[in-house]
Every structure is written in C-alpha cells, then in structure tokens.
Image (cartoon, rainbow, N blue to C red):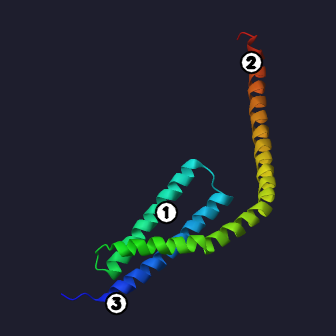
C-alpha cells in the first residue's frame, strides 16, 4: 500500500486553516462575553459549545482528509493555526472590541438602567393596584371588625 504524501500535505494545511477558523469562532465567543454575557453559567455553556465545535471540526477534518485516521501533525497544525490567528488577527480584534466596548459601555448602562427603572415602575404600579384591591375587599367586610 502506497503512502500519498500529497494527502498528508493537504491534511496539514487544512488543519492549519481549521485552527484559524476555530480561532475566529473563539473570537466571536470572546466578543459576546465582553459585551453581553458575564454569567459564569453562560460562560460554562459557551465553553462547552466551543469544545463541541472543535470536536466536530476535527471529526470532519479527519474523515475527509485522512480516511478517519487521526494524525498527530494535524492536531499540531490546528494548534499552530489557532495560535497564528490568536496572536495576530485575534489581538487586533481584541483591541478593536475593547475600544468599541469602552465607547458603547456607558450607553448600554444607561439603556439598561432606563429599562430597569421602567420595569420597576410597572411592577410598583401592579403591586400597588393589587394591594389596593386587597384593602378594598377587606373594607367591604369592615376590616374584620364586623361580625356577620
């Protein structure tokens, strides 16, 4: 059985591209953490989703390029591609997102405070109405002082 070295090179370069794409997906998760999600439970499920995405991408990569056989150099190529993306374009996107976050964060806080105030006022009106209804019902019975 012959070894086709061309397929090995294709697998290696495909694994580098796979690592770079996984770095891009990681950046998407990082941006969502920066802007929206800071809950530890949500971050746990994001990390779990990223691990599942990595596993599926490796399964597809190995199935398509090496007939289902795992190759160590493919893992190293993916790690290299991820590191190349993370330390070049990833640092650039991180810096840009931090700059955008520093500009947008005060606006988001104001919007969040206004929404919270509106929800609180609505809750207060509903609670006041409910308490008044209870008092009106009790007043009809003489506040418990009248015996019927």
| SS at mark 3 in the image | helix
Q: Residue 132, can we see it?
A: yes
* SS at mark 1 in the image: helix
Is residue 127 found left or right of 73 in the rendered image? right
Above-or-below relation of 127 to 140? below
- Determine contact: label 3, label 2, CB under 8 Å: no
Question: What's the CA distance linking mark 3 and mark 2?
Answer: 92 Å
Q: Between residue 140 and residue 39, name the one nearer to us.
A: 39
Badge 2 density bin: few <14, some 14–19, many ≥20, Cα 10 Å: few
Residue 108, horizontal then vertical, whole percent: 77, 57
Along the polypeptide, which appears first: circle 3 or circle 2?
A: 3
* The N terminus, quarter of image: bottom left
**Which image quadrant is residue 32 in?**
bottom right
Q: Residues within 10 Å of mark 3 (few under 14, many from 20)?
A: few
Q: Quadrant of the C terminus?
A: top right
- What residue is shown at x 38% (from left), y 77% (from top)? 61
Residue underneath mark 3: 6
Q: Answer few, some or many: residues within 10 Å of disc 1's Cα (few below 14, many 20 plus, some between 14 and 19).
A: some
């Amino acid at each position: 059985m012959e070894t086709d070295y061309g397929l090995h090179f294709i697998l290696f370069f495909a694994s580098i591209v796979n690592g770079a794409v996984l770095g891009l997906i990681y950046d998407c998760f990082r941006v969502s953490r920066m802007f929206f999600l800071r809950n530890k439970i949500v971050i746990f499920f994001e990390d779990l989703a990223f691990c599942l995405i990595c596993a599926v991408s490796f399964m597809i990569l190995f199935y398509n390029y090496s007939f289902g056989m795992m190759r160590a150099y493919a893992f190293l190529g993916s790690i290299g591609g991820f590191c190349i993306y993370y330390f070049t374009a990833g640092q650039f996107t991180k810096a840009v997102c931090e700059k955008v976050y520093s500009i947008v964060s005060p606006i988001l806080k104001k919007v969040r405070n206004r929404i919270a105030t509106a929800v609180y006022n609505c809750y207060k009106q509903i609670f006041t109405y409910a308490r008044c209804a209870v008092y009106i019902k009790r007043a009809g019975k003489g506040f418990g002082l009248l015996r019927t």
